[in-house]
């Protein structure tokens, strides 16, 4: 049950409340960018089908924030 320690998320400092800095794990989905490639369905009316394109969009994991929440049960370990 060896777990790699090299994949620990980096921590970003964010101010969600005025004057209160919090250290939260960087979002692994977008690497803290708040945006990543998301699939978007493009309907093709000529052929009647559609296709998917990848475009840069708001990260669905962190909703564009660039950081994630600590797991709820982190303190129990
Ligand atoms: Zn993200």
Image (cartoon, grey):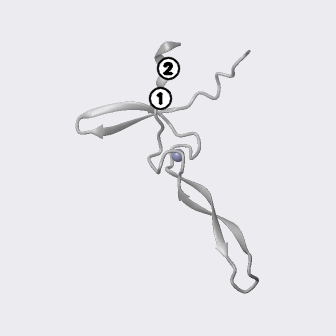
Split into 4 quadrants, where in the image is the N terminus?
top right
- In the rendered structure, the answer to whether residue 20 lies left or right of residue 37 reads left
Q: Could you tell me residue 75's position as x and y percent?
A: 46, 16
Q: Is 70 situated above or below 49? A: above
Counting labels gives 2
Nearer the observer, 65 or 45: 45
Q: Could you tell me residue 6's position as x and y percent?
A: 65, 26
Determine whether label 1 and label 2 are within 8 Å by CB. Answer: yes
Given the current orientation, which residue lies at the most extreme left position?
Answer: 19
Residue at the (54%, 50%) spot, across then down: 60
Alpha-carbon distance for marks 1 and 2? 7 Å
Dot 1: within a 10 Å radius of its alpha carbon, few (fewer than 14), some, or many (20 or more) residues? few
Given the current orientation, which residue lies at the most extreme top position?
Answer: 77
Location of mark 1 (residue):
70
- In the rendered structure, the answer to whether residue 38 lies left or right of residue 68 reads right
Residue 74, disc: 2
Q: Could you tell me residue 57's position as x and y percent?
A: 54, 60
Q: Is 26 situated above or below 44? A: above
Given the current orientation, which residue lies at the most extreme front position?
Answer: 48
Residue at the (49%, 20%) spot, across then down: 74
Q: Based on the displayed image, in which of its 4 quarters is residue 31 positioned?
A: top right
Nearer the observer, 43 or 53: 43
- In the rendered structure, the answer to whether residue 16 lies left or right of residue 34 reads left
Residue 24, disc: none
Nearer the observer, 61 or 45: 45
Q: Could you tell me residue 24's position as x and y percent?
A: 44, 32
Residue at the (76%, 83%) spot, across then down: 47
Residue at the (53%, 13%) spot, across then down: 77
SS at mark 2 in the image: helix
Q: Does the residue labelled 2 lie within 8 Å of ligand 1?
A: no
SS at mark 1 in the image: loop
Dot 2: within a 10 Å radius of its alpha carbon, few (fewer than 14), some, or many (20 or more) residues? few
């Amino acid at each position: 049950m060896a777990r790699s320690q090299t994949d620990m998320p980096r921590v970003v400092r964010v101010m969600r409340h005025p004057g209160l800095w919090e250290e939260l794990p960087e979002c692994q989905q977008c690497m803290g960018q708040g945006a990543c490639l998301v699939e978007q369905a493009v309907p093709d009316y000529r052929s009647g089908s559609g296709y998917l394109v990848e475009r840069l969009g708001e990260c669905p994991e962190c909703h564009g924030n660039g950081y994630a929440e600590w797991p709820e049960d982190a303190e129990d370990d």
